[in-house]
Image (cartoon, grey):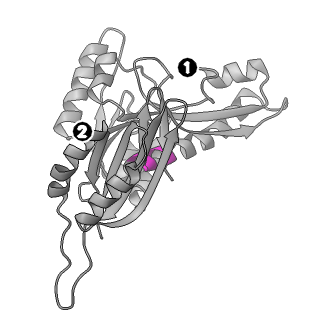
Amino acid sequence: MSHSAVLLIDCPDRKGLVARVASLLYQRGANILHADQHQDHELGLFFMRVEWGLEGAASTGREPERFDLDGFREAFAPLAAELGMRWQLTSSARRTRMALFCSQFPHCTADLLERWRTGELECEIPCIVSNHQDGEKLAGFYGIPFEFVPVTAATRSEAEARQLELLARHEIDLVVLARYMQILSPAFVARYPASIINVHHSFLPAFTGARPYHAAHARGVKLIGATSHYVTDLLDDGPIIEQDVARISHRDQVEDLVARGRDLERAVLSRAVRWHLDRRILCYGNKTVVFD
C-alpha cells in the first residue's frame, strides 16, 4: 500500500498562503494527491489540508524515491514560524492506535469493530476497556484484549489511574467512547487533547446528560439526533465533528426513539472516527473544520 503524508495548517489569513506551501512542496518533489482550504472571514483565519504521496515516480529500471519527510519538516518549520502557523505533519506509515471504551450498550463498539475488520477504519485496536463485563465475548470474537475496569464513585480515581496506565502501555493515540457511560475527569481529558471522541445520543446542544431520549420524548420533539464530538472538561460541550437526525412522530414511544437513535449513533461515531484517522479534522475554539 502506498503511504501518504498529511499537513494540517491553521493561521491568520493573508494573501499567498497556498502558493507558499505549494511551492515548498514542489521544490521538495512532492506529488500532491489532495488539497483543500477554508477561510473564517469573521475571525480572519485560514485552514488548509494537503496530502501527498511518500513515494515519488519511478524512473525506468529504478525503484521509486521516498519523499524526505524529515527534510520537509525541517524546511517547513521556518516558513510556519514566519506566517504564524499552527501545524501538524503526519504519515500514514504509522497507523493510529485506538482504544475503545464501552459500557453496557454494545452497538457502537460492534459497529466500529466490524468496520475495522473489513478495512474501512485503518488503525490498530490494541484494547477494549469497559466498566461492565458485557463486552468481553464481543472483544474475544475479534481477538482484541478486553480490560474490565469497574468504576464507582469511591474508586473513580483508582479506575482512571489504571485506565491511563493501560493506554500508556498500549501507546494509544485515540480514545473512542463508544457509549461509555462514565464522565472522565479533567486530568484524564488533559492527557489526550482533541484525541477523545464521544458519541452523545441527542442533537447537541439540545438534551445533554444521561437520558436525552426520555427528555426528547417528554418535550414532544419531531426530530431526534446523535452527535459525535471531541471531549473537553465541560460535559457534552466539546467541538462537534458530526451530527445526524431522524424524523419521529407523536406515535413513537421512548423505546422507538432509542431504537432509531442507535442507528444514528453508529453512523455519526463511525464517520467521526474515520475522519480523525484520515487526519481531516482541525479544531479551533470550540468548533471544527472537517475537510472533504
Q: Distance between the residues labelled 1 and 2?
A: 44 Å
Residue 6 in the image: above or below residue 151: below
- In this picture, which residue range is highlighted in magenta? 269-276
Residue lying at 47% horizontally and 26% vertically, measured from the top left = 286
Label 2: state its secondary structure: helix
Residue lying at 38% horizontally and 39% vertically, measured from the top left = 10
Q: Position of residue 169 (x, y in %)?
A: 16, 37
- Name the main secondary structure of what is drawn in magenta: helix
Q: Mark 1 points at which residue?
A: 210
Pointer 2 local density, CA inside 10 Å: few below 14, some 14–19, many at least 20: few
Q: Which residue is farthest top? A: 154
**Which of the 4 quarters of the picture holds residue 213?**
top right
Q: Residue 81 bears which disc, if any?
A: 2
* Relative side of 225 to 80, left or right: right
* Relative side of 198 to 125, left or right: right
* Relative side of 196 to 181, left or right: left
Amino acid type shown at disc 1: Ala
Residue 96 in the image: above or below residue 106: below
